[in-house]
């Protein structure tokens, strides 16, 4: 039987221990019927990341960046390097991840079972491994864009592959054909969160976006940055209007919403609502705070993929 070729790529920068932990986890995954090659895009690390990889994982290919790639351009460089090997699939992953032994086989099996699909893993928190992390956001124009779930667990999700509107980029399996069809991430508009626009663009071009719940990946929790409203006035102005790579920057937020939205009109509208809600929260609490979430198994009951 011919093995399925998978290129795994990850951009890294000055997180040597996390990167080594991630590579060690990848070295232990089940590769039955898979031919796996790993590419690390080391974007100007100064902490010895590249040397440590060469010593501990000599089979890993290292591609060097100039230190200014950020996530999107770093991922794009990894994809371009991966395509030179003519793989069947490219798996884009973050280095702050630990992988279940069978995650890759489950993702590939799902992709093979459902052609013309892009596959996302079930992301879980590594300090609370039952809690779901950044999986299956839903677009809601009138709430200001993407709604992320906060209270989902392995017991509240569909137990079979289900279709979503967007796949967060922590661990995504892209068939080579979809990359050849839609191109690379938009690093001009979204140099730090290119994944927000990438899979919705694929969906608009006729590809299904699926989450495979049996492919489990454990992620480092996000540590929320300081709230803009809590910043001193000068810092607040700098973040909102000058720091174009900051997730709280208004220009960046505009691009994020407009280019990831189902339509540009919905993106424009959501940005306006986001801005109004941001001002609203200056005086009152978030009206969505503390509200109960329905189970994802209920929300996506009709989105489960049928054979």
Image (cartoon, rainbow, N blue to C red):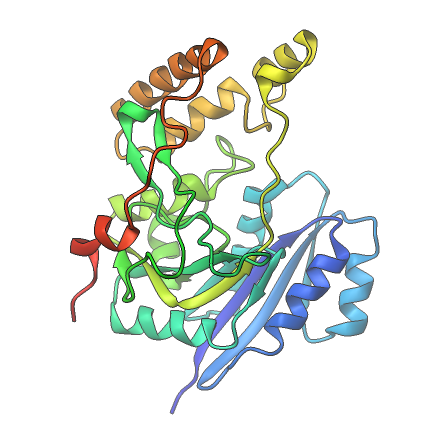
Is 140 left or right of 83, judged from the image as shown?
A: left
50 over 77 or under it: above or below: below
Q: Foreground residue, 293 or 136?
A: 293
x, y percentage for residue 139?
30, 36
x, y percentage for residue 54?
78, 69
Q: Quadrant of the C terminus?
A: bottom left
Q: Foreground residue, 256 or 130?
A: 130
The answer to whether residue 172 is seen in the rendering is no
Picture residue at 50% right of the left edge, 34% below the top: 190
243 over 27 or under it: above or below: above
Quarter-of-image position of residue 144: top left
Is 146 left or right of 300, judged from the image as shown?
A: right
Q: Quadrant of the N terminus?
A: bottom left
Picture residue at 50% right of the left edge, 25% below the top: 252
x, y percentage for residue 48?
83, 56
Picture residue at 81% right of the left edge, 65% below the top: 52
Is 16 left or right of 267, judged from the image as shown?
A: right
Q: Foreground residue, 171 or 55?
A: 171
Total marks shown come to 0
Q: Foreground residue, 133 or 128?
A: 128
Picture residue at 20% right of the left edge, 63% below the top: 305
Quarter-of-image position of residue 63: bottom right
Quarter-of-image position of residue 179: bottom left
72 over 291 or under it: above or below: below
């Amino acid at each position: 039987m011919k093995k399925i070729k998978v290129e795994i790529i990850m951009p890294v920068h000055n997180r040597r221990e996390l990167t080594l932990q991630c590579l060690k986890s990848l070295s232990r995954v089940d590769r039955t019927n898979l031919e796996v090659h790993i590419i690390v895009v080391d974007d100007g690390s100064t902490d010895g990341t590249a040397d440590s990889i060469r010593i501990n994982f000599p089979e890993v290919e290292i591609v060097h960046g100039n230190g200014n790639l950020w996530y999107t351009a770093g991922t794009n460089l990894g994809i371009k390097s991966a395509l030179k090997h003519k793989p069947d699939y490219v798996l884009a992953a973050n280095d702050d991840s630990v992988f279940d032994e069978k995650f890759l086989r489950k993702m590939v099996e799902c992709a093979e079972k459902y052609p013309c699909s892009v596959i996302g893993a079930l992301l879980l928190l590594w300090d609370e491994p039952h809690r779901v992390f950044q999986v299956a956001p839903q677009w809601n124009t009138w709430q200001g864009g993407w709604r992320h779930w906060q209270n989902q667990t392995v017991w509240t999700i569909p137990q079979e592959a289900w279709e979503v509107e967007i796949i967060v980029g922590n661990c995504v399996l892209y068939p080579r054909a979809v990359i050849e069809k839609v191109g690379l991430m938009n690093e001009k508009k979204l140099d730090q969160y290119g994944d927000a626009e990438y899979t919705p663009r694929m969906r608009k071009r006729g590809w299904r976006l699926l989450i495979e719940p049996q492919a489990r990946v454990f992620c480092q929790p996000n540590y929320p940055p300081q709230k803009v409203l809590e910043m001193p006035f000068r810092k607040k102005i700098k973040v909102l209007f000058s720091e174009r790579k900051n997730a709280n920057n208004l220009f960046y937020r505009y691009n994020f919403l407009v280019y990831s939205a189902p339509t540009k009109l919905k993106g424009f509208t959501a940005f306006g609502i986001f801005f109004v809600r941001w001002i609203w929260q200056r005086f009152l609490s978030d009206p969505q705070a503390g509200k109960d979430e329905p189970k994802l198994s209920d929300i996506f009951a009709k989105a489960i993929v049928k054979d």
